[in-house]
Image (cartoon, rainbow, N blue to C red):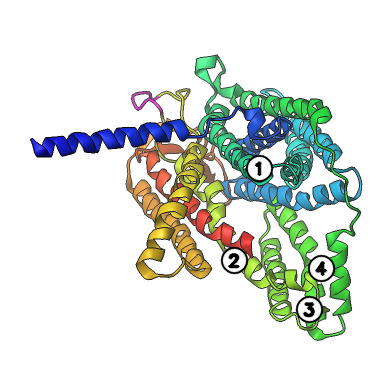
Amino acid sequence: SGTKFQARNLFKGLGDTLQEGISARPRVEPLGTMFPLAVVPIILVEFCERLCYYTFSGTQKTWLQDRGYSNSQSSSLNLTWAMLSYVACFFGGWLASSKLGIFMTTAALSFLYAVGTYLAAYAALPGVENITIYLIGVFGLITLGAGGIKPNVCTMGANQFDPDAPNANEQRASFFMYFYLTINVGSAISHGILSSWASSGAPSLGVSLEYGYFFAWTVAASFMALACLFFVLGRCCYRKVEQKKEAPVLNMMFETLLEGSGSSMGKLALLGWGLIPIVIAVAFVNAFVENNILKVAAIVVALTCIGSLVAAHWDNSYLPAGGVRMCLDCVPILLVGNLFFNILQSTIGSVFLSEACQMDTRTDRSDFSVEGFQRNGDFFRLANPIAIVVVTPLMDFVIYPLVKRTTGREVSMGIKVIAGFSFAIGAQLIAAAIEYQRRSDPVLSVPSHCAPYMMVKDSSGHVVMKEPREHVHMSTTNSFYMLAPYAMVGIGEILVNPVLQHL
């Protein structure tokens, strides 16, 4: 009886403690008190931009294949477009800081982004299917739009918080949490829904297979158009921040490099930086023209550029002291780290996608018809953002503290990078093992909607498309196996990217 009495007291004490904790718990505040309502249209722009970006990133490869581009060339075009979108951030940042300001730059280029997505949707309309219009919309307008939004919308959101206001830091931290969340929600919708609608249509909504790309891209375009509209309408709510007149960062960098150009390392640095536009131009041309000599030239120019920059900035003692020199000290590590990790990371939008598209992606395994609904291979890329969202807090609150308690030391940046590369390399090995199994599994009679067309050799030995055109048939391999390599690359990103950004 004494034990029961102690147990009752114990549970009573726990209940009282729990009740006190609930009473003392901070009340969940409405959105407007968590942070200014002016940030809502800003977050909406980022959400819609990421939704559009990942929709095209996951579907343009398969659409280009259907227009006659080879598997490798369509992958190259997709990766080149991603590269150009990030290069355009330099233009967007310069335009905002030197000419139009953050609001006008974001509004104008968001409008171009929406126009570009509608153009791409029109180009995919059955009966139109125009490559030129598509390239203008995606490689022209969407690229400029992404370059205008990416470097500016985050800064504009942070500007909405008065640094002198109480709890400004907490509110800003809350904003960035929601900002990051919208990126992952946008990518989840594009990978999980829109990419499959593009390649298979949306039968439940009455959209047939041939109208799939037009429908999915129109949905994405409408999201972007609404975001642009709400962003402009919110202008009266935005906090006005005086823009400081500063010299463009690139000007400051090249002035510093010119001051050190008298030494051999200074000349090597100028060579390396001067080759960057050539590397981009050669890569762009190489994506459209399949030529072995051009491929070799692209590799030589890229290696020369990288080698020159790494050697020139390994020791920057020849440059005048200052902030620019300190920034350039990071170039070798950032360049090499990003280069090799991005090679591994780029597989999620190229070879992983091609592999998944040649596996059994049917939603109904009893349906052997050509028109039956199939998941796009990009659907399995969902594992990437999910792994990032789930594993990030696990690392911060469980694994890193556990390692510190066990070893008495913090997890070093070097260990994080090694672990991140290990996960990304492991993803390639697992994907290779799955591909080996796929090749040995039986082939179904069902063509895959997102696989390339079958190729055959003609009488002269050239590889041409088989007529009548038919997509490569899917194997019996379960496509959900691809969740593992996609997730492992995501874990690698958690470990590597924050270290490189911190540097």
Distance between mark 2 and mark 4 Cα atoms:
21 Å
On the image, the x and y values in percent for residue 422 come to 44, 63
Q: Which residues are magenta?
A: 363-368
Which residue is situated farthest in the top direction here?
206
Residue carrying label 3: 268
Mark positioned earlier in the residue sequence (2 or 4): 4
Which mark, by number, is residue 465? none
Taking the image as drawn, is residue 102 in sight? yes
Q: Secondary structure at mark 2?
A: helix
Residue type for callout 1 = Asn
Distance between mark 2 and mark 1 Cα atoms:
37 Å
- Residue 274 sits in quarter: bottom right
- Residue drawn at point x = 49 percent, y = 44 percent: 389
Taking the image as drawn, is residue 139 in sight? no
Which mark, by number, is residue 337? 2
Residue carrying label 1: 167
Magenta stretch mostly in which secondary structure? loop
